[in-house]
Image (cartoon, rainbow, N blue to C red):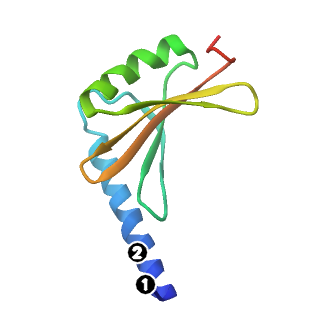
Amino acid sequence: MSAAQRAEDRRAAQMGGARAVERLASLPGLPPVRRWEIDGSTGAVRGQLDVAASREAVVPLLRPLVAAHRGRARVRNLPDGSRQLGVRFEWRLWDVELWATIQGPRGS
């Protein structure tokens, strides 16, 4: 595959991700999102939730998304001792991950 073709494929993936973000913004029950990221090679969409940095604030927002979209809950331990709580699901043609960072090893 030529460099020009790879560049065209990346642009197409990014445009697909941008369309996904636009459509996801109108999805019923979607929590507020602070910022979106689009993977340049796959078009996967990642959104940082705009919620308080506590487990008690994040978990009730993620549970309905897991149930409605057959998603998977995700937890990432970060080097600074905080955690990212999130949900990953497929929506239409896109892989979507929504996440929030909480402080402390157990969200405290």
Residue plotted at (41% across, 59% down): 43
Q: What residue type is labelled 2?
A: Asp
Question: Label 1 crowding class (10 Å Cα cut-off): few <14, some 14-19, many 20+?
Answer: few
Q: Is residue 35 above or below residue 14?
A: above
Task: Identify the secondary structure beneath mark 1.
Answer: helix
Residue located 54% across and 18% down the image: 52
Q: Are marks 1 and 2 in contact (CB under 8 Å)?
A: yes
Could you tell me which residue is drawn at 28 percent across and 32 percent down?
A: 70
Label 2 Cα crowd, 10 Å radius (few <14 / some 14-19 / many 20+)? some
Residue at the location (31% across, 44% down)?
Answer: 90
Task: List the residue tagged with mark 2.
Answer: 9
Q: Mark 1 is on which residue type? A: Gln
Report x, y in % for residue 63.
36, 20
| Picture quadrant where residue 98 is located | top left
Q: In the picture, residue 61 is in which quadrant?
A: top left
Compared across the picture, whether 80 is left or right of 101 comes to right
What percent of the width, then of the height, locates residue 38?
A: 46, 54
The residue wearing badge 1 is: 5
Residue 17 image-quadrant placement: bottom left
Image coordinates of residue 41 in percent, x first then y, are 47, 65
Residue 29, placed above or below residue 23: above
